[in-house]
Image (cartoon, helix red, strand yellow):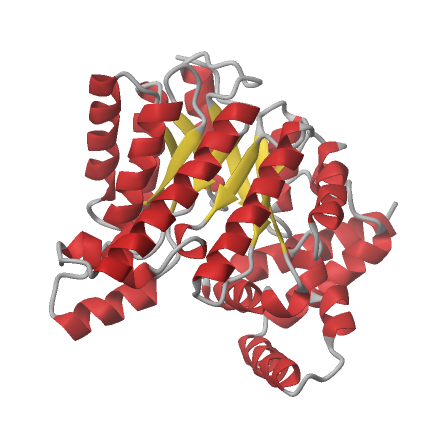
Amino acid sequence: MPAKPTISFDNLKVAFASKSDAELRKMHLVFALLNNKFVSDLGIALTKIGFALRLPIKGIMKQTMFGHFCGGETIAESTAAAQKLAEYGVESTLDYSVEGDGDEASYDQTCAEILKTIEKAQNQDSLPFAVFKVTGLGDHRVMTKVQAGEILSQEESLAYDRLKNRVDQLCHAAFQKGVKILIDAEESWFQDTIDSMAYEAMEKYNRESCIVYNTYQMYRHDMLERLKAAEQVAKANGYLLGAKLVRGAYMEKEAERAEEMGYTNPIQPNKVATDRDYDLGVEFCISNGVYLVSGSHNEASNHLVVELIEKHGIDKASDQVFFAQLYGMSDNISFNLANAGYRVLKYVPYGPVEKVMPYLIRRASENSSIAGQSSREFSLIKKEIARRKSK
């Protein structure tokens, strides 16, 4: 039996090494706000009103929520944030987090922006991945009709072709420049359409190395079997499967739509089932040579991945397994893993402050609703402040 891996996520000196005392105080303020659901909800409401009325609140946002959870407004600002992470062995992917206007011009603009992140990543060792959401490149209503097997109008058919071309353009650019690319998971009613594009790209570009990664939301009760089926298809067709595993992000929306339309809710019955399938999923990937990005803020799951890497004798420095967390969250996990020599990826969102608001609002809601997430972060920050004072 291999020895139990010696890694702790409680080493606060390592976790907050990149933060000055002033930055730590700013984090304390952000998580104090998030830790109080009433204050958090009120802050979100006031921020929405402030932007709607065009009040000069951008500076406040850059000093608080935006400044903590986003790398900046531009690729250049975010690259600076990524370079600071790289000083501590943490790698990044620049995540353009602007939700477009839902027209062809905005889809083209998003595609052009993501191409720029691929170009930036080619010349930056600390940026091994690019990332995109398919809904940033095309109409989700068209994807929903495709998944439902409905006949598209001529206009919809042309729009769908343009969407597929944009996805291929990004995956091809990543392939040419030797940059890995993550395709984010979205809602179940058009996820099959996204999957088909992801697997088509893998078949073209994942022959010799793993370039394209699809995302699997393990809070869906069918996802473990879908992951296993994807591995079988990849093996049969001679390409490498890239899989990013996450727990999931659309639970309330999924439940509401299932009830409204009278079909079985695709979400797991409880968190225990989600945790079980997540852990079974990472074990399946590592045991079967699937290229894995383990996107988790759960300490137990991260410990498990470390154990599996050691059990299977995987080189920590290889690209076989990456850990991933969001910028501004779970630094105790990210920095301690990186300090121990593992490949760790931070999602670094960026975009104009006012246009990244939907992303920030989701982040704030998630932090205040995930049991213990913001209170855990807040507790660690308070402990580190106390540790520094006692030195």
Residue 176 on image: x %, y %: 52, 24
Residue at x 71% of width, y 55% of height: 72
Q: Is residue 321 above or below residue 168?
A: above
Q: Residue furthest front?
A: 154
Residue 107 visible? The answer is: yes
Q: Quadrant of the C terminus?
A: top right
Q: Is residue 343 above or below residue 70?
A: above
Identify the residue at image location x=57%, y=61%: 374
Q: Is residue 249 above or below residue 48?
A: above
* Left/right of residue 144 with respect to residue 298 in the rendered view: left
> Camera-side residue: 186 or 355?
355
Task: Describe residue 103's horizontal placement relative to residue 352 as left or right.
Answer: left
The residue positioned 58% from the left and 74% from the top of the image is: 36
**Rendering coords of residue 274 (x, y %):** 30, 48
Residue 65 is drawn in which quadrant?
A: bottom right
Residue 238, given in percent of the width and then of the height, sits at: 27, 16
Residue 272 visible in the snapshot = no
* Quarter of the view holding residue 267: bottom left
Relative to the observer, which residue lies in front, 262 or 184?
184
Number of numbered discs: 0
Is 72 in front, or is 146? Answer: 146
Image quarter of the N terminus = top left
What is the x, y in percent for residue 103? 44, 65
Q: Nearer the viewer, residue 127 or 372?
A: 127
| Left or right of 295, for residue 331 | right
